[in-house]
Amino acid sequence: MDQFDYSDITPLPLVEPNNPVTTILYSDEYKNIFGHLAALLAAKEYSERAYALTNAAIEQNAAHYTVWQYRFKIVVALGKDLEKELDWLEEIALDNVKNYQIWNYRQLLIKKLELKSMKRELPLLETMLDEDSKNYHVWGYRKWVVSYCGDYSNELAFVNKLIKADVYNNSAWSHRYFAVVNLSQISDFDFDSEVQYVKENINLAPNNYSSWNYLIGIHEYFKKDLTDLEDFVNTHTEDMLDTEVEGVISKPGLELLVKILTLKGEKEKAAKGLDLLASKYDTIRVNYWNYQKSLLSKA
Amino acid sequence: MSEEISPLNTARHIKYFKMCLTALPSRAQKQDSNKLLLIYCSVCALSLLGYEFTAEEKKDISAFIYLHYVPTGEGFRGSLTHKLQPWNRYDPGTLANTYSALCILITLGDEYRKKLDSEAIMKYIKSTQIENGSFLSILDIDGKPFGDGDLRQCYLAASIRKLLQYPANGVNDFDVDKMQQYIISSRAYDGGLGTQESHAGLTFCGLAALKLTNRIDGTNWDTTIDWLAHRQIFYDQYNSDLLQYDYCDDTDQGGHNGRANKYADTCYSFWCAGSLSLLNASQFIDRQLACRYLLNVTQNQIIGGFSKTDADDPDPYHAYLGLAALSLLKFEGLKELDTMLVIPKDASSVLSS
């Protein structure tokens, strides 16, 4: 705020009523910044000093719901360099990783720039996801920008890297699904090698619901038969219906076995699997497995 | 697990929420723009705990809330720091704060429907609805929808409509069909709802928005129930390999996560229990273990409230949702909850279904 003269502005005072509720003990700096901001907003002033003030306001409270549209209006009115604005926003993003508004603002800038290349965005997305590989906002933005640019070509290599670093990362599996579904619409998609890839990753972590759910998900999407997976599932659940196991098993594997047996009409075996889940291997969900068993007898 | 469950420290929680209604330290500045949300959590928490507001308190709190009503009558601002003089659209009502205001007023027994301009509010909500059927959080200076939009905003819009008892044939009703389509299309391959990856908070928002508009029936939710049932965290000898993973912690036993392979968090106990309750599937939660997690792990025994995880300080949002979850889990000593609106049920009994 020091670079500009605000002396002609009377900041709107923050007057608490007589019996205030949930009084936030605002710092003097906060009161000063938002008092001036309110005065400028009321006057709809689009100026360099207003631009500087939005920066100070966002640093204090990035969740402020009007400062972002105000800043955008100023950027457009003053013909600001949008690339520089994107650079500035990167700094803000790195300081406010759980914020919604930042990514919405970034979309506005990208649309205004009519940027149709992923190149500008890839390093930022990579840095942000390095910091927090499950950040919902960042993944959402990645999905948006990929769709907006219509460029899915980087996505598989990217998620391969993330899954290699952390096979349990459900965000990466979910993004993989998004990438695969879209890629399959624009080019030939090798379903079998995709399935092979998932199986190898399941073998690394048999209790990982993320990879199992993905495996089932792509079977459903590409209308493939889940029973094709029976041999693979058996490598994880071998003899479990006959011989009880102590120690680590594959819970999602056993669940899929039950699904396959149900599809094949082998109700007795499926019921045995559900009994084992209810009484031994996943007792916290006993009611759920018993309910599934009750459906079995109705089917 | 035979560990005894700690009691609900009602007196401490009441003290905690009364403190939240009095003052918050300057670090709460980051939440200034949604201050009404903090007040909503505190007021509803106190009511769930059985606290009786005095006539004086009711008067003061509701008078304070009405100071946030914008002059066009379209909704509520989040904080008085947003108030502009002269007023223009840079001081808009927001869906989140309008929802919070209505929840506070109904919980205090205020006759807000006689005082507010329902048509103006609904016209505003309708104007924030976008092409895909969801809603954005505000109207901008030009009167166009602006901000982030997703299942949360659908939930808020549907709740406001319900709290105003707005009729389905009203001229300012929003497009419920389109909202329904948006929500149903947001179901992911594993059964949860989300703007991308399945997310328990967004799943609740989507399901509750459908239930509030009588649109939840007619869709098969089996995969959603399956996904929700799996959110309750359980480690035993059969999956002890997971405990090597950074995001798996054995103190999380019985808690819920919001996405697969993540830590438990108090708020997800609510989002999951709430979602299952909306689907008439509450029996798929292990109540004992779920209560244990909340009361033994995230309940703060010193200052009251609940924190996000065992490693955080309490905050009004997690503290309220912790209590809301316990209420849904039928833990003794709490009032019943209106799952759809996330307010005490006795408060919403004035509304027709």
Image (tube, coloured by chain):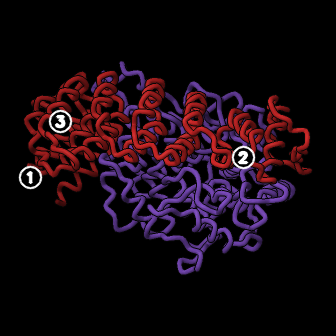
Chain colours: A red, B purple
The residue that mark 1 highlights is: A265
Percent position (x, y) of residue B156?
A: 57, 58
| Label drawn at residue A194 | 3
Judge by depth and name the residue closer to the eye, A113 or A277: A113
Q: Mark 1 near mark 2, Cβ–Cβ under 8 Å? A: no
| Label drawn at residue A255 | none
Q: Residue at x 41, y 25 (%)?
A: B248
Which image quadrant is residue A120 in?
Answer: top left
Secondary structure beneath disc 1? loop
Percent position (x, y) of residue B304?
A: 69, 34
Asked whether the residues under marks 1 and 3 belong to the same chain, the reply is yes
Amino acid on which the number 1 mark rests in the picture? Gly
Asked whether the residues under marks 1 and 2 belong to the same chain, the reply is no
Quadrant of the drawing holding the N terminus of chain B: top left
Q: Residue at x 88, y 44 (%)?
A: A9
Q: Residue at x 20, y 35 (%)?
A: A253
